[in-house]
Amino acid sequence: MIRLHNVSKTYHLKGSRDGAPPGVIEALKNVDLHVPQGQIHGVIGLSGAGKSTLIRCVNLLERPTAGSVFVDGQELTGLSGGALNQARHRIGMIFQHFNLLTNRCVFDNVALPLELMGMKRAAIRERVAPLLELVGLADKADQYPARLSGGQKQRVAIARALASRPRVLLCDEATSALDPQTTGSILALLRDINRKLGLTILLITHEMEVVKSICHRVSLISDGELVEEADVGDFFTAPRTRLGREFLNDFLQLEPPRALIERLEAAPGEHTHPVVRLAFSGDAVSTPLISRLARECGVDVSILQAKVESIQERTLGLMIAELIGTSGETARAVDYLETHDLHVEVLGHVQRDD
Ligand code: ADP
Ligand code: MG
């Protein structure tokens, strides 16, 4: 439904007044992305990574410097003027700061794109009423934005984005200005719309919580490049890049105690034992693996931290543990864990106290 092929975006900065030299910013570099119909795809990255540029290239609010953009089978990068405007009716967008018109009531904000399309008043009324119903604001049609909460404003923006019956919804940090509880209710609404209308959603965020709660798939953007893409369950079990692991550790707050980190050595030595981070999902969660590990490999396991998370329909267990035994025993233990569908990462080695 959305396809980006080799998209790059370069900004040329003019020299600033205080004499700084002109510069070139490569905000996107050779981005390939495919979001199938009906999917919720998240793009996560740090501030300045290129997220907003990426999403604005999808509806050509920014025109890519190179590459092509297809939405619903049509190449947007080949269009301009009226044809591009027409194509944009199939793409809705919502923003961090809602972008409502303050001098228009809720109804008239939602009606605006339809007015611009030249739709008759009666038809507009028929279209807007069910949308306000859908977003839970049927009783607020005559209110002005100033009297609404942040969550209600975003609901108006969602109704407005859906007014032209788009096939795709783009969300640029749509919940970043909202408190956690309101964020939850807006994400639930987006999930609901995705299911009811089969709407394809591309959202960008810097929050793992958003990815965890509604995305099917996620891409990681760093310095203008997509560096990792995975199903959300896989990403939360075993991110493949260092940045992915940093996002995950930040989110889970599952880091070894500082005192231990300071003692960690990269290479194993004669009198050291490994500290491992284990991630397990599915059947492994309910199997008594740790006691079996102790029995079958002869190691002692000292659990430093552990937690269980629910991600989509999957249960994910995470643990940081020291494996205590001879180097042969601990190597066998790591093998044993790997063959039992656990993701094992050796964080380092610590000196044995004994
Ligand atoms: P994000 O949304 O991930 O925070 P952006 O896409 O806004 O990142 O920005 C990516 C990079 O492009 C940044 O270095 C930013 O300063 C630069 N940038 C974004 N928009 C413009 C613009 N209109 N002109 C010049 N540079 C820009
Ligand atoms: Mg941004």
Image (spheres, helix red, strand yellow):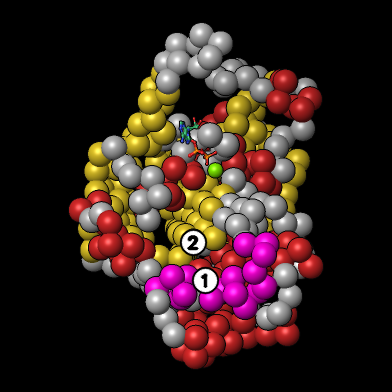
Residue 342: horizontal and vertical position, in percent?
53, 51
Residue behind label 2 places its C-beta within 8 angstroms of ligand 2:
no
Query: In which quadrant of the rendered image does the N terminus lie?
Result: bottom left
Q: Viewer-proximal residue, 1 or 229? A: 1
Q: Cβ–Cβ below 8 Å for labels 1 and 2?
A: no
Residue at label 1?
112
Q: Magenta segment, which residues?
A: 101-117
> Would you identify the image quadrant in which residue 267 lies?
top right
Q: Which mark is residue 260?
A: none
- Specify whether residue 145 is in view: yes
Q: Is residue 212 left or right of residue 230?
A: right
Mark 1 or mark 2, earlier in chain: 2
Picture residue at 57% right of the left edge, 28% below the top: 327
Magenta stretch encompasses residue 113: yes
Q: Mark 2: give few (<14), some (14-19) or many (20+) Cα within 10 Å.
A: many
Picture residue at 44% right of the left edge, 42% below the top: 53
| Structural distance between the alpha carbons of marks 1 and 2 | 14 Å
Up the image or down, 221 lies above or below 105; here it is: above
Residue at label 2?
93
Residue 150: horizontal and vertical position, in percent?
73, 62
The amino acid type, in three-letter code, at marker 1 is Leu
Residue 34: horizontal and vertical position, in percent?
32, 56
Q: Is residue 329 left or right of residue 217?
A: right
Up the image or down, 171 lies above or below 263; here it is: below
- For label 2, the SS is strand
The amino acid type, in three-letter code, at marker 2 is Met
- For label 1, the SS is helix
Q: Considering the whole magenta stretch, tell me its main secondary structure.
A: helix
Query: In which quadrant of the rendered image does the C terminus lie?
Result: top right
Q: Viewer-proximal residue, 31 or 106? A: 106
